[in-house]
């Protein structure tokens, strides 16, 4: 199994290879782990590998095939998991010094489901600390580099998962998305990634950042791979009371390539002031969709300009509460020099958190503090209702909305890290869908003249992942993603 | 919106977060810049708008309740396994009560 072969693998290709006895799941896991370790010298997509767990999952698949049983929809598929998603017995650090040695006593529901489906977890991927950032530079263990251009960031916060899939060292991956942390790295690395409807995938075992915005979602080289993985992990889980009861359609079976008559909206607020190369590629993609039979409409989402302020108030407020649990008592590192309990909390947290987490804790605590709650947090929750209403009104007229994912392609390491507000502003196109709780995804739509991938974002109605994936898949079949 | 170092210090105390003098100064400047940007929200009239406290919930109120059935949970050793300091089956912390 050479690098070219491993890089080309999709879920269907793995399945065929196994069923035709061209290779065994254990052999694939071995080859992929070796390949991943070699590639990681350049990109550092993974933080650590879990070969024992991978081999035991792969052996179970081989045994099922030998017995003639159905090995499951993800049989033998090498998967990378973002290191904010708990894996029992396998270190889960959230890319934070505080959790450098944390070994979870239980698995996230998404992890349980993907292993039950035959998936083989190879290791845990790098990210911004506690998923806070847009470049994976906020990892306490060093940045990940974009496999397309190692001078550049892979995006974030799920940069390691996106890089692993883009360089072919995992066939698919799990990421988490709070304000764009799946879609933006997918676009920077030239692959597809899905942020499902809020509640579609259980968050049990996802380390909480901003609970009203957190999602788990898939990455894949193809739309079909995303559809297969999403179907496996989606659905009600009694361990997450926010998980949705809505039945889960057979997403891959619904990818029929027929998008005739689908109404697409282009929100004018997203296209003004857009770097021309990105804008041109999106408009070219829309032309292709028109050729496939879609109808295109000009629409307006008037509250778009307020989304960043709204998002960064809500997400930091929730983050400051969620991060309060890292107190040096139960599962983090600790400062042992402090004599009092409060001093121990203060110093443990001061030493343990990186700059971005501290900034968000301070900002979040400030906007929740006495005298400011109404002016910031309550106001932001009202604005959030208006943003959601904009989308609800738009979806009375159109079936899907198309926008860019990011105002610009992958930037260089260090380029934006010293200007937090500038970094926040780059999330403009992804946070609106997160605030509304609707499904959104990034699908590649070409490259800039200098060879950097650009992603197109598709947003759809609540629980209409099927329609969204069908549109993305039709675009992919028509060659829209080629060259990305 | 002017933010003073005193305010940042106060918020850091609320959050039990030790900051160095250098961090405090940088945080003050960044917080001020970000909060000025946040003031943008005041341009929007939200009179009569209900805050969006819940994102999405499509089932009846009691749907998330399950039967109260006893089941296995972590044993004491598992719960303490990641503790930076433990003893006698408990988490250990610096002394809280003086004699």
Image: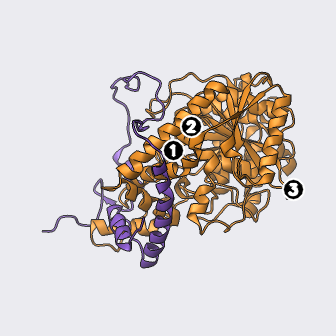
In front of the other: A99 or A129: A129
Residue placed under numbered mark 3 in the picture: A449
Please name which of the two marks, 2 or 3, marks the residue nearer to the observer: 3
**Residues at marks 2 and 1 on the same chain:** yes
Q: According to the colouring, which chain is purple? A: B
SS state under label 2: helix
Read off the chain for label 1.
Answer: A
Q: According to the colouring, which chain is orange? A: A
Q: Mark 3–mark 1 contact, CB under 8 Å?
A: no
Mark 3 or mark 1: whose residue is earlier in sequence: 1
Residue placed under numbered mark 1 in the picture: A206
The location of residue A305, given as percent across then percent down, is 58, 48
Mark 2 or mark 1: whose residue is earlier in sequence: 2
| Res A110 label | 2
Q: Is residue A272 left or right of residue A427?
A: right
In front of the other: A149 or A474: A474
Whole-number angstrom distance, CA of label 2 to CA of label 3? 38 Å
The location of residue A432, given as percent across then percent down, is 58, 43
Query: Quick check: can you spot residue A76?
Result: yes
Whole-number angstrom distance, CA of label 2 to CA of label 1? 9 Å
> Which image quadrant: the N terminus of chain B?
bottom left
**Residues at marks 2 and 3 on the same chain:** yes
Q: Is residue A32 left or right of residue A450?
A: left
- In the picture shown, does residue A66 fall above or below B32? above
SS state under label 1: loop
Read off the chain for label 2.
Answer: A
SS state under label 3: loop
> Which image quadrant: the C terminus of chain B?
bottom left
Q: Mark 2–mark 1 contact, CB under 8 Å?
A: yes
């Amino acid at each position: 199994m050479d690098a070219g072969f491993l890089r080309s693998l999709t879920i269907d290709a793995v399945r065929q290879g196994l069923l035709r006895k061209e290779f065994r799941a254990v052999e694939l896991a071995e080859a992929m782990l070796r390949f991943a370790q070699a590639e990681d010298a350049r990109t550092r997509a993974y933080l650590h590998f879990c070969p024992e767990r991978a081999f035991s999952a792969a052996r179970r698949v081989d045994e099922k095939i030998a017995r003639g049983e159905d090995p499951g929809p993800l049989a033998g598929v090498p998967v990378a998991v973002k290191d904010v998603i708990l894996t029992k017995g396998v270190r889960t650090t959230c890319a934070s010094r505080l959790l450098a040695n944390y070994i979870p006593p239980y698995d996230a529901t998404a992890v349980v489901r993907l292993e039950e489906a035959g998936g083989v977890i190879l290791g845990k991927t790098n990210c911004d600390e506690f998923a806070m950032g847009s470049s994976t530079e906020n990892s306490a263990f060093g940045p990940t580099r974009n496999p397309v251009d190692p001078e550049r960031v892979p995006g974030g916060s799920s940069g390691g998962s996106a890089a692993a899939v883009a360089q072919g060292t995992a066939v698919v991956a799990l990421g988490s998305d709070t304000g764009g942390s799946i879609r933006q790295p997918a676009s920077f690395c030239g692959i597809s990634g899905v942020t499902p409807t809020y509640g579609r995938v259980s968050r049990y075992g996802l380390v909480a950042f901003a609970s009203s915005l957190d999602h788990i979602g898939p990455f894949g080289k193809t739309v079909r791979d995303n559809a297969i993985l999403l179907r496996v992990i989606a659905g009600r889980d009694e361990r997450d009371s926010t998980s949705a009861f809505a039945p889960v359609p057979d997403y891959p079976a619904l990818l029929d390539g027929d998008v005739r008559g689908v109404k697409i909206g282009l929100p004018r607020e997203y296209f003004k002031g857009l770097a021309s190369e990105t804008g041109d590629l999106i408009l070219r993609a829309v032309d292709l969709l028109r050729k496939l039979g879609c109808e295109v409409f000009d629409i307006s989402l008037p509250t778009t300009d307020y989304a960043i302020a709204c998002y960064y108030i809500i997400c930091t407020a929730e983050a400051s509460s969620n991060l309060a649990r890292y107190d040096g008592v139960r599962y983090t590192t600790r400062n042992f020099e402090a004599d009092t309990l409060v001093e121990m909390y203060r110093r443990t947290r001061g030493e343990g958190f990186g700059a971005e987490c501290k900034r968000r804790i301070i900002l979040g605590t400030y906007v929740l503090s006495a005298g400011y709650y109404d002016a910031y947090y309550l106001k932001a929750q009202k604005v959030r209702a208006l943003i959601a209403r904009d989308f609800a009104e738009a979806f009375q007229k159109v079936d899907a909305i198309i926008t860019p994912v990011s105002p610009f392609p992958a930037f260089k390491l260090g380029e934006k890290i010293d200007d937090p507000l500038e970094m926040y502003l780059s999330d403009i196109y992804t946070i609106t869908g997160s605030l509304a709780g609707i499904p959104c995804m990034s699908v590649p739509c070409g490259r800039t003249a200098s060879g950097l991938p650009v992603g197109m974002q598709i947003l759809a109605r609540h629980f209409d992942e099927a329609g969204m994936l069908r549109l993305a898949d039709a675009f992919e079949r028509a060659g829209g993603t080629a060259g990305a | 919106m002017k933010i003073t170092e005193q305010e940042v210090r106060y918020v850091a105390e609320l959050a039990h977060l030790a900051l160095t003098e250098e961090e405090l100064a940088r945080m003050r400047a960044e917080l001020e810049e970000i909060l000025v940007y946040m003031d943008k929200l005041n341009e929007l009239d939200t009179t009569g708008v209900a805050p969006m406290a819940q994102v999405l919930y499509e089932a009846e109120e009691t749907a998330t309740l399950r039967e109260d059935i006893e089941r296995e949970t972590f044993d004491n050793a598992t719960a303490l396994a990641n503790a930076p300091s433990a003893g006698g089956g408990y988490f250990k912390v610096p002394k809280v009560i003086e004699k």
